[in-house]
């Protein structure tokens, strides 16, 4: 059996400690990359849910504003802007989804044994795209037909007849008859009005 000198034993301990430290730092670097990718993924996912909701709220405000404007040209401009805004948002959310996919793939590198990919990766973005595309189509239809959109209602037409006399029954014990037969109760006129203008 070969004996080792204390000096070679110290060199071996130092080399093993150095290898262990290097492995720890590699693992720590991978852990930090994993955590950072997860934080980016969470923030992108939050944006993915916030951006379309904000755009739909803004589009609804533009639609409301378009229905209150009297000029057809102004309605057309506002609704055209709403359509372009919705279409550009579709491009933005698809770009966000691409970034999310990039981070998902980066996260997948840390656990290669998890090879099972879930189906329906694009369900959420498909729903948002459908909603925004529908919003853009409605905006375009409204911009092409601004006369059909109006929140303002026509003023009510005047009544064709007016009350000419209000009568009060002075004898409350006696109920007026339901049928149009003249009642025997004593009535006093309390208010009169002029006949309606025709």
Image (tube, grey):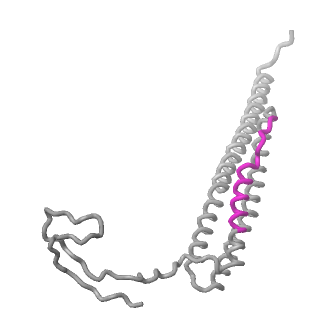
Residue 114 percent across, percent down from the top left: 78, 34
Give the vertical position of 39 relative to 115 (above or below): below
Give the vertical position of 165 relative to 117 (above or below): below
Task: Please count the marks in the image.
Answer: 0
Q: Quadrant of residue 30?
A: top right
Q: 46 or 120: nearer the eye?
A: 120
Q: Residue furthest front?
A: 181
Residue 153 percent across, percent down from the top left: 52, 78
User: In the picture provided, is 190 more to the left or to the right than 63?
Assistant: left
Residue drawn at 70 percent across, 57 percent down? 128
Q: 118 or 157: nearer the eye?
A: 157
The range drawn in magenta is 115-137
Residue drawn at 68 percent across, 65 percent down? 135
Residue 63 percent across, percent down from the top left: 60, 72
Q: Main secondary structure of the magenta part?
A: helix
Residue 159 among those drawn in magenta = no
């Amino acid at each position: 059996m070969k004996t080792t000198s204390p000096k070679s034993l110290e060199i071996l301990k130092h080399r093993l400690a150095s290898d262990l430290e290097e492995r720890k730092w590699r693992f720590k670097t991978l852990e930090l990359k994993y955590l950072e990718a997860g934080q980016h993924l969470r923030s992108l996912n939050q944006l993915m849910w916030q951006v379309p909701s904000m755009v739909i709220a803004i589009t609804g405000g533009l639609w409301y504003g378009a229905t209150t404007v009297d000029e057809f040209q102004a309605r057309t401009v506002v609704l055209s802007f709403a359509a372009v805004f919705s279409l550009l948002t579709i491009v933005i959310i698809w770009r966000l989804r691409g970034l999310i996919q990039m981070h998902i793939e980066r996260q997948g590198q840390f656990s290669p044994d998890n090879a099972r990919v879930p189906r329906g990766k694009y369900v959420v973005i498909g729903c948002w795209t459908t909603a925004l595309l529908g919003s853009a189509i409605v905006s375009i239809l409204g911009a092409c037909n601004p006369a059909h959109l109006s929140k303002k209602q026509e003023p009510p037409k005047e009544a064709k007849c007016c009350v000419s006399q209000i009568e009060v029954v002075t004898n409350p014990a006696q109920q007026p008859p339901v049928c149009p037969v003249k009642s025997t109760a004593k009535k006093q006129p309390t208010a009169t009005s002029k006949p309606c203008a025709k």
